[in-house]
Image (spheres, grey):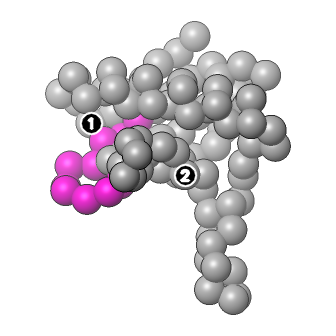
C-alpha cells in the first residue's frame, strides 16, 4: 500500500492542533481529518475519530500495525514541514 497523495490544511490560530490532513492510498482510497498535533514530545498525528456514547473518542480509521503508523506519521509530518514554508493554505504532495 502506497500513500499517493497528501493534502495539508494548515491551522492559522495558536493552539495544539497545527494542521488537518487528507491522504490517498494507492490512488483509490482517501482518509480525511487526520490531525497534526504539537505535544510535549513534539509533533504527532491523530487519526480521525468520533465521540462514543460513553464520552470517549474512538478512531474511525487507523493503521493496524506499527510499521504502517510510522509510515503515515513520517509522510504526513514531512508534508506538514514542507507546507510551513509555503504561503498557500493547501499543500499537496503527489507521488
Q: Nearer the viewer, mark 1 or mark 2?
A: 2
Q: Residue at x 70, y 28 (%)?
A: 25
Which residue corresponds to mark 2? 46
Question: Quadrant location of residue 42?
Answer: top left
- The x, y position of residue 23, in whole percent, is 58, 34
Residues at circles 1 and 2 in contact by the CB criterion of under 8 Å: no
Residue 12: in magenta span:
yes
Question: Is 56 drawn above or below residue 42 in the view shown?
Answer: below
Q: CA distance from mark 1 to mark 2?
A: 20 Å
Q: Quadrant of the C terminus?
A: top right
Q: Residue at x 53, y 15 (%)?
A: 94
Question: Quadrant location of residue 65?
Answer: top right
- The reply, left or right, for residue 33 in relation to residue 15 is right
Q: Quick one: label 1 or label 2, which is nearer the N terminus?
A: 2
Q: Residue at x 25, y 59 (%)?
A: 15
Q: Judge whether residue 73 can be spotted in this image.
A: yes
Q: Judge whether residue 20 can be spotted in this image.
A: no
Near mark 1 (Cα within 10 A), the count class, few <14, some 14-19 or many ≥20, is few
> Outermost residue toward the front?
41
Residue 10 is marked as none
- The x, y position of residue 83, in whole percent, is 31, 27
- The reply, left or right, for residue 84 in relation to residue 67 is left
What range of the chain is rendered magenta? 8-17
Q: Residue at x 54, y 51 (%)?
A: 46
- The x, y position of residue 50, in whole percent, is 62, 70
- The x, y position of residue 1, in whole percent, is 79, 22
* Main SS class of the magenta portion in the image: loop
- The reply, left or right, for residue 71 in relation to residue 83 is right
- For the image, the number of numbered tags is 2
Residue 89 is marked as 1
- The reply, left or right, for residue 39 in relation to residue 14 is right
Helix, strand or loop status at disc 2: strand
Amino acid at each position: 500500500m502506497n500513500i499517493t497523495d497528501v493534502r495539508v490544511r494548515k491551522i492559522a490560530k495558536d493552539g495544539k492542533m497545527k494542521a488537518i490532513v487528507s491522504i490517498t492510498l494507492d490512488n483509490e482510497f482517501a482518509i480525511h481529518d487526520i490531525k497534526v498535533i504539537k505535544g510535549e514530545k513534539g509533533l504527532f498525528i491523530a487519526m480521525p475519530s468520533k465521540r462514543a456514547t460513553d464520552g470517549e473518542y474512538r478512531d474511525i480509521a487507523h493503521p493496524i500495525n506499527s510499521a504502517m503508523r510510522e509510515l503515515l506519521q513520517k509522510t504526513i509530518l514531512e508534508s506538514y514541514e514542507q507546507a510551513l514554508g509555503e504561503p498557500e493554505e493547501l499543500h499537496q504532495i503527489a507521488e
